[in-house]
Image (spheres, helix red, strand yellow):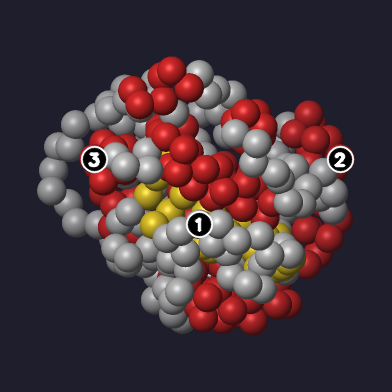
Amino acid sequence: MNDPEVKIHDVWANNLEEEFKRIRDTVKNYPFVAMDTEFPGVVATPLGQFKSKEDFNYQQVGFALLDKEGNMPPTGDVWQFNFQFSLNDDMYSQDSVDLLRNAGIDFGRHQVEGIRMADFGELLTTSGLIVDEHITWLTFHSGYDFGYLMRSILLSELPKEESQFFQYHRKLFPCSYDLKMLLKHPGLVNAKLRGGLQELADQLKVIRKGQQHQAGSDSLLTAQTFFKIKERFFEDTWDQVAPTVEGHLYGLGNTLSSGAPFVQMTDSSSTPEPQQSSTPEAT
C-alpha cells in the first residue's frame, strides 16, 4: 500500500457539486469505497422504528477511495461531507455533542453552511458509487451508516422489516464488507482482535491520518485496517472467506450477527429506484 500525503476535503453546501465531480473521476480507478459517519447519538432504536428525519441527522459522512491493492490516489484525497444540523431543532446526546466538539466539529457552521440530505442524495445517485457491482464498500459496524445513505437516496421511510432493508442494501450497494463482521470469522479467532475501530487499528499498528471522530479520517482508517487484516490473515484464502461475510451488516440479519431478530422475507416486492436527478424538495 502506498502512503501519500493525505488531503481531507471538507465538503459543504457551496462545494458539494465540485467535490462529487472529483469523486466521479476518482472512483473509475479506485473502486473500494470506505465510509464512516459521525452523528450526535440518539440512534438506539431497532431498525423498524426509524421513522423520522431526526433519526438520521448526521453531522458528517466520510468517503475514502482506494484501489484493489489498498492504494490511495497519489493526490491523497479523502472526502468529509458536512451536513445541516441545528442544536436548537434536532435531537442529540449532550455527551456525543461534547465529544464531536472536542474533535473539531463546528455546530454553528453546520447549521448555516451544512449540506441538505436531499442534495447529497441526488448527487450520490449519479456519483458512480452506487448500484454498481464493481464498487466495493468498506465499513465498520455500518447498519445505521447505510441506513442514512439509503434514506438520502430514496427520500422515503426505510422499511420496517430487515428483509426489505437488505433488499434495498443489496440493490444500492451490491458488494460490501463490514469489518465488525469480518472480526467474527473463525480465521481471526486466534488473533484476538477486538474493540472499536481505533483499538483495532492500534492492535494492527495502522497509523491514523487526521482527527479521530471526524468522518474523513475514520473512513480512511477503516479502509487501511481492512486491507491490513486481509493481507495479514487472509492473503491466500480471501476468495473463500469473502463470500461468507460479504453483504452482512453487524447487528442486522441472522448470519454471524448479534443484533435484532431477523425477519424472514414475506413478499417479493421490488426495490424502489433511487430519486431522479431533479431538484428535490427540502427534507
Does residue 100 lie above or below 44 as drawn?
below
> Pointer 2: residues within 10 angstroms few (<14), some, or many (20+)?
few
Give the residue number, with chain letter if any, for mark 2: 102
Give SS at disc 3: helix
Residue type at tag 1? Gly
Give the residue number, with chain letter if any, for mark 3: 240
Q: Which of marks 3 and 2 is nearer the N terminus?
A: 2
Dot 1 and dot 3 residues touching (CB under 8 Å): no
**Residue 40 disc label:** none
Across and down, in percent, residue 171 comes to: 28, 57
Question: In this view of the protein, can residue 103 be seen by the observer?
Answer: yes
Residue displayed at 62% across by 52% down: 220
Across and down, in percent, residue 199 comes to: 65, 29
Residue displayed at 79% across by 58% down: 111
Q: Earlier in the sequence, mark 1 or mark 3?
A: 1
In the image, 15: left or right of 152? Answer: right
Dot 3 and dot 2 residues touching (CB under 8 Å): no
Q: Earlier in the sequence, mark 2 or mark 1?
A: 1
Across and down, in percent, residue 210 comes to: 76, 52
Dot 2 and dot 1 residues touching (CB under 8 Å): no
Give the residue number, with chain letter if any, for mark 1: 70
Residue displayed at 73% across by 51% down: 209
Question: Mark 3 or mark 2: which is in front?
Answer: 3
Residue type at tag 2? Asn
Front one among 112 and 31: 31
Give SS at disc 1: loop
Does residue 64 lie above or below 203 as drawn?
below
Q: Distance between the residues labelled 3 and 2?
A: 42 Å
Q: How far apart are marks 2 and 1 (CA)?
A: 30 Å
